Structures are given as C-alpha cells and as structure tokens.
Image (spheres, rainbow, N blue to C red):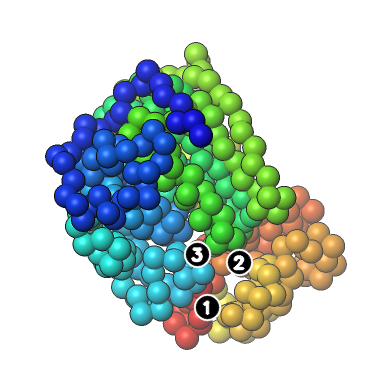
Amino acid sequence: MTSPAQHDRQPLVEPSAQLNPDRLIRYSRQLANPGFGELAQRRLANARVLVVGAGGLGSATIPALAAMGVGTIGVIDTDVVELSNLHRQLAHGVADIGRSKLESMAETVSRIDPEIEVILHDVWLDSRNALELFAGYDLVLDGSDNFATRYLVNDAAALTGIPVVWGAILSYGGQAGISWSSHGPTYRDLFPVPPAPGTVPSCAEGGVLPTVCAMIGAIMCSETVKLITGIGEPLLGRVSTYDAVSGRFRELEYAASDDADAITELIDYDLFCGVTAAPASSGTHGSNDASSNSDDASGTSSASDEIESRELAAMLCGDAPLQLVDIREPFEFAIAAIETAELIPLGGLEGRLADIRTDIPVVVYCHHGIRSERALRMLQGAGFTNIRHLVGGIDDYAQVIDPALARY
C-alpha cells in the first residue's frame, strides 16, 4: 500500500512536544496509517481549529476532531438544543433540550477526551468580531447554514490568511470544499453572487437526511486533517458533492476568477445577500436587521404583501371574513396549525387555484415565511391581488401569539 500523496504545500501547523505513552496508545490505529505517524499526530495536538456552528455539521465534525486529537477546538454558536435538532445533531441528546448547544457540545467533547481544550464563543459572528476571533486559530471549519455567514467566513479568513474548510447540506445532498486565498480559489470564485433570498430553502424548510450531515462532516474532518498535517491532496479548487438518493459522488473543479474584486474589508453580509435592503437615501450598508420591508430586485416582498403575527391574530379575532391557507406539508400541519387554517401544500397549490378566494383577504403561511413568500409570488403571478403572507410563519406566531402551539 502506498503512502498518501505529498505536495510542496507545507503542513499548516508545527508539531507539539513528544506525546506521552497514553496518547500514543489512544491514537495507535491512526498512527499506523501509511505516511501519517507520530509527527502528524503531534501537529494535530498543536492545532487550533475554530468551528462555526454546533448544529448538524458541528455535531458531525467537532466530536470527530476531538477523537482524532485536534488539541484546541473553538466553537461559535448562540443557539439552544431543540427537539427537532436531535435527529441530525448527534452530539446532543434529549437531556440537552433547552441547554446551550455550546455547553452540550463541550460536555460531549469532554466525554470523548477531557484533554482536548474547548473554547466556547457564545457570540453572533459578524463583521465586527470575525477578524479578532479568527486571528486566534490556524483554520476555520464552517458549518453555518446561511449564505451571509459563509461569505463572511470566507472574507474574514482571507484577510487573516487562514484556510476555510466549508460544507453545505440540504435534503438528500451536500457539498464540501476548501477556501484559501493564498493557495487557490475561494468560495467567492465558486459563488460570485449569492442566490436571491428565498430561492434556497433552509434545512428547516427543505429537510435534511441525518446521514448527509455525517457524510459531509466526515469529508470536512478529513480535509482539516490533511491541511494541518500536510498529507494528501486537499480539495483546493475542487468541490466534492454527495447525493444520498443515488449514492454517487461528483467532483467539480473551479479556478480563481480574474474578474473577482480583491477582498480588502468586511462588509454588511446581510445586505450583500439581500436579507436586508439598502436605505433608499444612500448606497451604504444597512443595519443587520433580518427583516426586509422593501420590494427590491432580489424579489423580496413589500410591506403591503406582508402581515405580522399580531395583525393576523387581530384579524382572526374580528368579524371580517378571512381565508387562512397553510402551505406546509401534512406532517407539519399535524404538529401544529393556526386555528381555522386550510391546508394546501405548496407543491399542489398551482393545481388548487380554484380553492383560493378572490372576494376576501387571503393570508398564506408556512414554517418560517420562506415558502409562503414563494406561494405569494406564485399567486400574484396567477392574477391574485388579495394575498398576503405571514412574516416569520407559524414559528413566529407561536412565539408572539400562541405559546401553546408546538414549535419544531
């Protein structure tokens, strides 16, 4: 059996001091890999890896990094564990529901190996703190679930000179790659322009198979080890994609773009991705408020197309007629539904236009407001002028109006 291919690229991390016998026993099966050995293990022990997100990909990568001997693991997250997380976020359990994901993850790592240092960053990663956070690490592993954060991570890593191992998952598929501005193309070369808001569903809206998290997470961990130790051929200028339905992998090659602007500063990434609209009076970056009340070129809805939870609740309590349409899937409707809502799943909406009233106001809603905005556009394209969609979906309605509704 031959050793992994070596490159002129140097290992990312210098080796630590000699490992004691207990550590050598722990990693003996790893040390036995051709071309690996104790020196590579000592590099892992000296490595500092920052993981963005303690959710699906974080759960698939952080325990594995700890088990493989990465000495210091930083984790950024502000979320808490929810019941709907548990099918894919295997680092957390039923007893962790309601706990900080950071605390739960630190406990998981401690059970694997108490000698691994875990640094918890209970902060929302943004342009104000990214450079300072990244400066303390050798590599960033990006398991975030939104495009604004992915572009932010890419740019901050480019400015600090460290590589990013990134992954993305949705439904039955996923992809992984490396972004390292000083050694090859970056995420911006692969995706120069973010998709329009609402065109790519989140895992909450589009679903995700747990094994896809595990598969993409495993690739990300392997790439992390390769960069730290210098073994193998990293996914620079290549993206590995996985389709669980067919069981097939594909590889896509890409190169640095001559037309790409140089990364010189961090920007407002919500604005860049169309999550927030630019103020009408200037072209400067707007606030980081995730809501948008303008109808711009990105296709986001205008204020007249939207309804908030409090206004909907007031209408439902009033005497005026209203048709409330739930465009989620039947299993979601069974979990929770707003009283008086009629279920017409988005996939069958075009075939049921005759069921949509034209003589009274109509409100459509989904889980978080993403699918309902698509339904709004579809119905407006079919000629309806009396349609509004619920901002934040039933999840917001449950928080603001009816806490008895189950959240998922």
Dots 3, 2 in contact, CB < 8 A: no
Which residue is found at the position 51% from the left and 56% from the top? 214
Residue 114 visible, this orientation: yes
Q: Secondary structure at mark 2?
A: loop
If you read the primary sequence from the N terminus, does the residue marked by circle 1 or circle 3 appear first? 3
Which residue is found at the position 47% from the left and 70% from the top? 86
Q: Secondary structure at mark 3?
A: loop
If you read the primary sequence from the N terminus, does the residue marked by circle 3 or circle 2 appear first? 3
Dots 1, 3 in contact, CB < 8 A: no
- State the mark number for residue 88: 3
Q: Is residue 198 above or below residue 282?
A: below
Residue underneath mark 1: 313
Residue at the extreme left of the image, as rendered: 17
Image depth: mark 3 or mark 2 in front: 3
Residue underneath mark 2: 366
- State the mark number for residue 280: none
Direction from residue 370 to residue 100 in the image, left or right: left
Q: CA distance from mark 1 to mark 3?
A: 34 Å
Image depth: mark 2 or mark 1 in front: 2
Which residue is found at the position 31% from the left and 51% from the top? 27
Q: Amino acid at mark 1?
A: Ala
